Amino acid sequence: MKIQLALRLCLLCLILVLSACATDFPSHYSAEPIEATVIDADTKQPLERVIVTANWQLESGNPGGSFVVGQMIVMEAVTDKDGVFHFPAWGPIRRKEGLLLDKDPQLLFFKSGYEYRSLSNYGRSLEGIWKDPVRTSKWNGKTIELKRFSGTIAEYSRRFYRFNSDLEQIADRKPEDCNWKKLRQAIVATERERLKIVSQLAQQKEVNPNTVGSVYQNIIHNDNWYANKGCGSPVEFFRRYGP
Amino acid sequence: MKQNRLPQLILLPLLISPATLMAYEIETHADISRAAAQASVLRDASENGLLSSLGLRVPFDDQTHLQDFPNSEGKSRNIEDLIRDGARFEDGFLCSDTRPRNHFFDPTFNPSSGSGLNWNSELKFELGTINVSGIPSPDWALEDNGKEPNQDFSWKSAREYFYKALTATDKDIRNENFGLTFQTVGHVTHHIADMAQPQHVRNDPHYASPPDCGPATFLGKIIKENFSRYEHYTDSVRSNLPFDGYKPVNQKTDSNFLTTARQFWSDSGRGIADFTNANFVSAGTNFDTIRYPFPRFDDVVSHDESANALLQSVGADVPSECLPPNQPCLMTFFRMSVMDNYRPAASGVNDRGSTLSIFDQDLKTYNKTVSRTDPDTGQLYTNRDVFSLNRFNFDEAHKFVIPRAVAYSAGLIDYFFRGRLGAEDVELTDTGMRLRVKNAIDPESTPAWQNEVLYAVNAQGIRGQFVLAYEFKGGDGIKRYGASQPVVAKTAAEGGGDLPPGNTSTTVYDFAISLPDDAREVKYRLVYRGKLGQEDDAVAVGQVEPASGFLVAPNYTPVDGIPGPRMIVRNAGAWRLTDKTDLQAGNVDWKGWYVNGHPTEVLSWRGSVKRYFPTRGLTEFGREIYQNGELWSVAPQMVLGAAIAKDANGAEWIVAITSNSTNDIVYRRHNTKNLSPAMFDPVAAPEGWQQLASFSPLAGLREPDRGWFFNGTGTEAQTIRRKQSTDGRAHLTRLKMTIDGTTAQIVDMGNSPGFLTMRTTSSKVSDSPLDGPCRPSGTETVEVTTTVALSGEYVIAADYVDHMEILVKLKQTGGATDVDHITTDWRMIGCSSPRNIDRSNSQHEVSSSIDTSITIDLGQTDIPQQTNQGSLKASYLADGFTQISGTSTTAMRDILLVLSYLDARNGFYAGMRTPSDTELDQTVDKSQFCQQLSRNDVRNLDVIHYGTNDIVGEEHDSGPGSGFCSSRGSLTGPLRTSLTDTLIGPVDPVPAFVPLETRVGSWAVDSNGNVAVSEQLSLSGRWFNHLSDGDLGVVISNAPSDARYGIAVIR
């Protein structure tokens, strides 16, 4: 029994030594530029002023569970009159924790009155996906269609919830990275949209407009919490840009 | 057609790869838990819903931040987001966090206990075998088998947080613990969702991402390729996951119930882990292994589909080897039965339970020979096709497991919050509050909780305990919290005992509290901690409403700016205005199920403003029945009376006697809120009304025009009904209905015969010219003495206090003595025989000595209607008995009260008190004189007025001057009359037998006997407002000088 225990300890030591020597994980990540065009799915016409955010998400896990470590980089852009948006290349930047998988980046598209859409590099084989130190988006150079929303305002509200939820996930993990500041236009847009939805829902008494939230409201109502992370006061920040 | 696929089946068992397993990613967990919360009892934001019982006023998903609590990171969140956070946080944030290892549960194998609760997996790598083990998911999530290290977010923890939140007197501590309660509920539901992941219940470890920090880094590098495709794919389509489609478990319609938290995991095949384990393969436990007995490969049916078409349908590249001339490649899918042991009717078929093809789980081709060793047999297999699970399998699995993940999570949330308390006989004492505890779990609405007995002592011998928590606004308007010291639950030996659902303790509990005098908007909650059902340390909670309370609708807006009907309650010695709004109640009420002399149930409906006596017939009634301040039920016909009855099983029924204008129709339905008037139908309206009986009018009875009034247990009721006599006159009869379960009978009880007047007359004559010797002249004196004895009674209404019948009788007693002193001068013209006599100058002097009373007899209480005491004197000159001149009368009488409202249950009546010792001194002509006598004479019942009509009275035919006013009657002998015979008032239309004056106003008595009145004074037009030991204008401040109120009783 003691011999078996000793063998196990030796094995553990060996594992630790090997671990120290391991160099499988990239030490740096960088990304190539992304440029793509957003059009109306029905008219095929370019869509101007679509808010596009890009986040390169670092993930990690344990047997049986995963978590978001944070974001390598967060950016936002707005489409021009030709529906074009552009994210510059970045890096190499030293990687601290977590690995990039297929949200490298995740792209979120929001325009009032259209179906919110989120895209990533999903579909790529997961085998060794974290290895490549230079990340590219499969949407680079592509034309991305947004569909004008045709359902009820209540259904639109439920989709809008998803956009807020995704933004909050980016903003909240590692709040000390101040990612909410990097999503300024998107966050302000959520509040403007919330006010619009609430106004319309209020006319339909069967739907409680108070169930429509915005990431903006969540941040503003947690001003101290965010401020204590060393990024300054969101209230002060959005006073300059707010809705 | 060439098929890049080897012949199937004969290759089994095939290869084994390093074990991989899947779970949900954190946003998927958040979405599942959100959907569960929305399907759970948390969505009920009604006045009697869960949130209200917790003292929470805002819907759980409200985004206005009016009801935020901090999560464990200190961030303010609403309840929904707290649950989402818990679902997210359960996987941890650090590689060093081993929480996810405890997210596995294998109901098939459990080497340690044999009960099937374990995860213990071995990961193989080049250097040997490493054993990674975790605590079985329910052990970790529930901690029902003991405390686990570093676990602060278990069910057990949630109970602690919940109790603290409900009983904390410090606002920050309360908020912190509410936040932790809801977050921890999310942690626990995370496990339920994991149990809807095949890998988590089939001992199939996986990574969603390689760990990349701390000691776990190495492990991550070893098994870095063990991505869970299922989890990753599920997250990518989470916007379109089928969250709906499977109702939360423990529905009323279910035949199986989960009655412990652990049963939600596993319960003889009915738990969520049982379901997932037996019906689905996982990446590492596919059909190429023989580790699990189910699903059995022998039971599956294969079918081929074009891989090319499938790949193109999802925008994936078709590999070159599947293009011409080899096209198309095929995928063999295995169709499997999905057995649902919890709801067998929800069983189905999974068309794509597994895949055998050249494609791997990423839909990439192997394009090479694959070799794997079966871990169980050690045998090496080589093949080119491989069993895998891809997005097409996942889409099919989602249809089964996602709705169940939501349904079981919602059911678990419901189970967590199932403990509901009520209180009866709530009394405010000098030191606090005294009440009897009710286990308010309703097994009718949730049969799953029918055995959730509230035990006084748990299995460890620990006594349960109650705390009376309360919140209020102080004089400064700031909300504050308080709580009594815990009061130990009393055992049977101490006069207490265990309380099954719906039962109320016989013993009384006293709670000492401290409440400032200026406290307002006080809300009480009773909190229990102890054994509930099979859970040893549960928490139950419920609002405590003072046993009395009125719904008062002022004609002004109070200072707090909340218009409309408001509830006022009396507690801590003072009346207080609650902030409840949108309450409803009827003006006629039934009180029943008396305990210690106090009613514990109250129903109300719309009826006559005078309770027993009609004013506008059936037009006053409605079909609505109200309970606890809300519209509770709508009957098929006009409701004349209602009560709550209980059947032999203790189930509560609303029994209603209604009318369709001719028949009395008796219905019943379960005592649950339901606003549909539909009749019972086993499919379309299982909660509909059941008709017990329909009674057509008995012979001679007129149509109903007033209410039925039930006894305290809803088994007997009475009403008064007009009945037509053969002579066309109407009188009143009493109907009694008995209801026994599903049958009802009605009996005409008749009425008493009426009033009896005994009259005797004697006369004495002196100096009569007819007597004695012949004399020239003289003055004759005749003194006629009439004695009248009055007696009799007549039932005019019937009601009950609990089982005791109360008959309201009009009763007349007393008597009068009239002396008519007549002096007449006479002159004799000769002494012939017969004597010729000339009479002149006849004078009458009439005096009466009166002592009578008319009362309404309530059995133990008499309401004096009129007394006459004193004398009535009249003198006049009569000219040949044909003319009256110089007439005058003087009378004294007391009309004590003209009723405007009567509630016989409490002996409560309201009305106008007339001035006492009213003096009548008038000079009238004959016709007026007789009329005046008729109206004022003590022997008339003319005190009883209905508007401008006399309603009930004895027709006057006697008394002073009767000889001039009436030719009827005899001066001697008894005169027996019945009420119908002596009716004064219009016979057609049918007279209303109402001994009341109709007034504008409303009157109510609450369960503690408090009275509230708002009645318009007839003369001045001003309003008389009254509240027992209080002032409506003060309780509902901002009252103008013309303040008036609509008043109804809630309890």
Image (spheres, coloured by chain):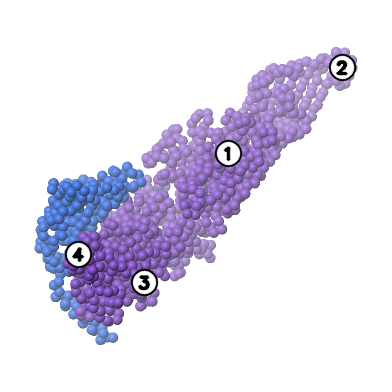
Q: Amino acid at mark 2?
A: Arg
Q: Nearer the viewer, residue B553 or A129?
A: A129
Q: How many C-alpha atoms fall within 10 Å of the one at disc 3: few (<14), some, or many (≥20)?
A: few
| C-alpha distance separating marks 4 and 2 | 149 Å
* Residue A166 at x, y percent in the picture: 23, 56
> Which residue is painted at 67% across and 33% down in the image?
B728
| C-alpha distance separating marks 4 and 1 | 83 Å
Give a yes or no on whether discs 4 and 1 share a subunit: yes
Residue that mark 3 sits on: B299
| C-alpha distance separating marks 1 and 3 | 71 Å
Give a yes or no on whether discs 1 and 2 share a subunit: yes
* Residue B139 at x, y percent in the picture: 35, 70
Q: Give the mark, 4 or 1, whose residue is nearer the N terminus.
A: 4
**Residue at the front extreme, as displayed:** B1
Q: Give the mark, 4 or 2, whose residue is nearer the N terminus.
A: 4
Residue that mark 2 sits on: B835
Q: Is residue B751 left or right of residue B631?
A: right
Per the rendering, the colour in which chain A appears is blue
Secondary structure under the numbered disc 2 in the rendered image: loop
Q: Give the mark, 1 or 2, whose residue is nearer the N terminus.
A: 1
Q: How many C-alpha atoms fall within 10 Å of the one at disc 2: few (<14), some, or many (≥20)?
A: few
Q: Give the mark, 3 or 4, whose residue is nearer the N terminus.
A: 3
> Which residue is painted at 50% across and 63% down in the image?
B498
> Which residue is painted at 68% across and 20% down in the image?
B926
Give a yes or no on whether discs 3 and 2 share a subunit: yes
Q: Which label belongs to residue A198?
A: none
Q: Amino acid at mark 3?
A: Asp
| C-alpha distance separating marks 1 and 2 | 66 Å
Q: Nearer the viewer, mark 3 or mark 2?
A: 3
Residue that mark 4 sits on: B318
Residue that mark 1 sits on: B705
Per the rendering, the colour in which chain B appears is purple
